[in-house]
Amino acid sequence: MSFYKKVISAVILTSVCVAPAMAQSGTNSPYSQYGLGQLSEQTSGFNRGMNGLGLAFRDGNQVNYINPASYSALDSLTFIFDVGLSGQVTNFSENGQKINANNADFEYAVAGFRIFKHVGVSFGIIPFTNIGYNYSITDYLNDDRSDAYTNTYSGSGGLHQVYFGAGWEFIKGLSVGANISYIWGDIDRSVINSYSDSYINTLSKYYTATVKNYKLDIGLQYLVNINKQNSLTIGLTYGPGHKLNSDPTCMVISTNSSTGVADTTSYTVNNGLEIPTTFGGGLTWNHKNKLKLGADFTYQKWGSLKYPVYNVVNDVPSYELTDNYYKDRYKATIGGEYCNDETSRNFFRKIRFRAGMSYATPYYKVNGADGPDEISVSAGFGIPIVNAYNNRSILNISGQWVHASAKGMLTENTFRINIGITFNERWFMKWKVN
């Protein structure tokens, strides 16, 4: 098979594998009803073993798309194809009550290879946000508990992105790169207020939005060789924020419970959704290409953005952009990887051991109060796949625990299993025949 046919085949395989999964939700979290939804990990299998660490990681046998400058380090002889999925169990607790929910998600498919000396490219499909929840709250209107009401909340959808990126080491040790993405998806949410008293109208609110826009991410990496055994890599990323050219709508339906007659009012906010400017920085220390330790920090400027909110003030309803809905988000991660000898013929010496932990603040507010902070830890393995014709592919397996909580709000504890397979094929090797 020719090189171009192989690339086209990989693109088709990526689309076939991931496109059907994009209609599924990878979350049951009620917190996904806020903003653009629950922010996705946006990391591949090897990153997740280190809890998402990777802004300053350079590995010729893995696609590290969180910093496109890393593509310049891709092995010149190989084509890398990486697919991943996850399964999770989440425990929700509030006011002494607990409930569990399960999810499974086919998350990403990416590929990468070198096209010129010091120039690598990558493409793939990855998630951006997830929305998925369905719950209800029932209470009484008066002290004698004669009249009850039920509020039902549900939502689905999310945003996804397909990207193409390139990285170039234009000076020894210094690389730059960029990912350009097409971002798309639907956001569907509803709130239905119903009453046991048939004389009180049922009020239903449906929020919808469709996104079709772009996303740009720029990266830089600088590798410093301290001595023959140690090196330090600095990684920086930048993503400009902008409007998404989406017109979110709110449809309010008031239904007479006795007669079934409905009165519908629709509201639209022109160009009402946007993504924030994002900055990232990381350091990685590499000792003998065996031990790699690093730290990442990211900052997203959500606080300066507005979001459309439906309100009723003095019996006058409105649906308009509102300040003080978002807040700036920070995330700090530390982690590392150890591999005794990735070139060894001994299977056990080639296994990669990974671990990491993170702390992240929320990007939205709930009724004026900050949403839940997140604390997460992970550990995993990179297990070599050895067969008659390939000993470079890797099975990446990791477990992750995420704790999300805020005072007076729902607490979430999630245990997630991440599985990724990195197929590493030597498409570009020149065979010598004697």
Image (cartoon, grey):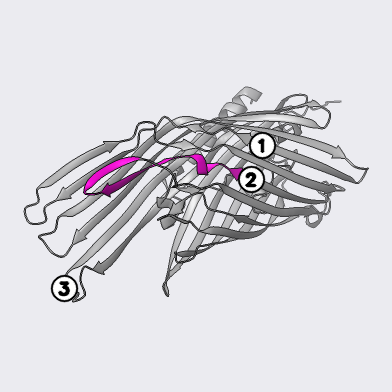
Tag 1 near tag 2, CB within 8 Å: yes
Picture mark count = 3
Q: Which amino acid does label 2 sit on?
A: Thr
Quarter of the image that includes the N terminus = top right
Q: Which amino acid does label 1 sit on?
A: Thr
Magenta span has 307?
yes
Q: Earlier in the sequence, mark 1 or mark 2?
A: 1
Q: Where is residue 87 in the image (x, y as percent from the top left)?
A: 52, 56
Comparing 257 with 73, the one in front is 257
Q: Please tell me which residue is depicted at 71% across the width and 54% down the height of the picture.
A: 334
List the residue tagged with mark 1. 237
Mark 1, other Cα within 10 Å: few <14 / some 14–19 / many ≥20: many
Residue 298 is labelled as 2
Magenta span has 160?
no
Q: Which amino acid does label 3 sit on?
A: Ser
What range is drawn magenta here?
Answer: 298-320
Comparing 98 with 269, the one in front is 269
Q: Please tell me which residue is depicted at 60% across the width and 25% down the height of the picture.
A: 5
Answer left or right for 144 relative to 278. Answer: left
